[in-house]
Amino acid sequence: MTTPSLNSQQQSSPRTYEVRTFGCQMNVHDSERLSGLLEENGYVAAAEGENPDLVVFNTCAVRENADNRLYGTLGQLKPVKDAHPGMQIAVGGCLAQKDKDVVVKKAPWVDVVFGTHNLGSLPALLERAAHNDRAEVEIKDALEEFPSVLPAKRESTYAGWVSISVGCNNTCTFCIVPSLRGKERDRRPGEILAEVQALVEQGVTDVTLLGQNVNAYGVNFADPDMERDRSAFSKLLRACGQIEGLERVRFTSPHPAEFTDDVIDAMAETPNVVHQLHMPLQSGSDRVLKDMRRSYRTKKFLGILEEVREKMPDAAITTDIIVGFPGETEEDFQQTLDVVEKARFSSAFTFQYSPRPGTPAATMADQVPPEVVKERYGRLLALQERISEEENAKLVGSEVELLVSQSDGRKNAETHRMSGRSRDGRLVHFSPSESEPGVVDRKIRPGDYVTVRVTDSAPHFLIADSGVLTHRRTKAGDNVEVGQIPTTAPIGVGLGLPKIGRPEKTKVSEGCGCE
């Protein structure tokens, strides 16, 4: 594992890096922080197709195949590293937090292992590994500082993630996340709003507020002088509504047990908060929900959906469902199908149950045979496909506003279409031709906004082939043309909490953010 000193290498030419992300939106956002941190320490992103000097894996541990995928990829990378003197490999994220030094036992060519609580240690660990010519494993048991104190190099010019909390206080029996991410701790509202403002000033118009349980925000402030405020999340949504230039605000993920009327009212009454809601069901059987330790039942869940649709009839509601949880009977599964039929989700993320070591469900009796899980999973998919197709068909003929996206259409080159996302998150493939002369202002770019009429539908997307009705150029579109990616400087130094309200304008560098 001999690696020349990083400082001596950086004197001659900057070291290149690549961050590979597995897993959820939280991991994607953490990877933005890692990229910003590395660039602040002199690294530059590797060009496409180039072997980087450093590969960082930001890992997921939610499903068993995440382990297999990581260690398989590490095995494929070993000969690349052997042929590339000075190359380093770092493994971070949830799987690293879980496996700790097991990572270097399974893959001795890995240089650094770091966890979910110490992202900021990566540059020092890389330097130490190179100097000592040995793997450095550093896993912290608790969060020392919010990742927001690190710089971030954003993935998108027009959409941004903003973390409002870290960790989770729920004890779902199937979930390993709380043991890897720790107890919930909430960021200061002022810091959150400052980060949103900084993104907007660089052209971002679509922001997603992130947390393992966003609507518990305000109950777990780290500042002992700050009063618990169960309405803090709805206040945060309304405060985002005051930020000029922010056109779309969404959030993920809430928990049905703590989803309150004030949040629904804030969604309905704040113009830039989109009418899109991801509400995890997990199971339609009350008995299974109890075994999962999910502190709600199907009556409450369906009641939330009913109230959301009463106040926002156009709301698109998505969900998560696990098939084959230990002890799930055919009757339990049928109850899930019944709830899905009633709920009319626009789409669903469906999973075959996968036992995770360290979770209570992994040792429960009555594990469902894989062939039974697979058969039930197929029936659920077929049902949700039908519902998604029916719900999308209702939109044919309607006009929708799209935020044009960069890479959502795999067949766009063949179909001569572009793609975008409607306010409720639906994917729309559209013809960039003009519905009448002069509608398109020069050229449609990712990050711009267009209005189109839906002409056809499928379960997972809509089609709009009658031409663009309106086109609005944006700063994000300008940035796409020149290859400018937003960067945000470190925001916040502690875990206390000032009062909520619109932040003062944050000065944002137009450069790389590394000054």
Image: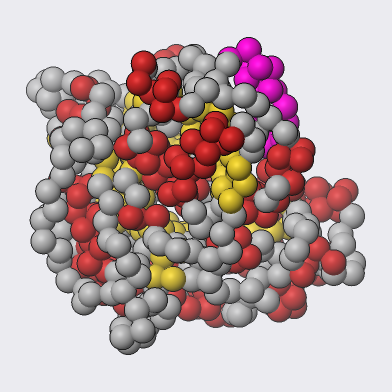
Q: Is residue 443 left or right of residue 176?
A: left
Quadrant placement of the C terminus: top left
Q: Residue at x 44, y 71 (%)?
A: 185
Residue lying farthest front? 132
Residue 318 vertical placement versus 227 (above, below):
above
* Left or right of 402 on screen, residue 295: right
Residue 371 is left or right of residue 68, and the answer is right
Front residue of 159/192: it is 192
Which residue range is magenta in the image? 69-84
Give x and y (percent) for residue 203: 19, 40
Of residues 286 and 360, the one nearer the viewer is 360
Q: Is residue 350 visible?
A: no
| Most foreground residue, 307 or 496 | 496
Residue at image location 22% in from the left, 67% down from the top: 190
Residue at 49% x, 14% y is 49
Please say whether residue 356 is visible from this viewpoint. Answer: yes
Which SS type dominates the magenta stretch? helix
Q: Is residue 263 above or below residue 111?
A: below
**Which residue does the image show at 71% across and 64% down from the upper left?**
174
Task: State the image quarter where residue 157 is shown.
Answer: top left
For residue 339: magenta? no
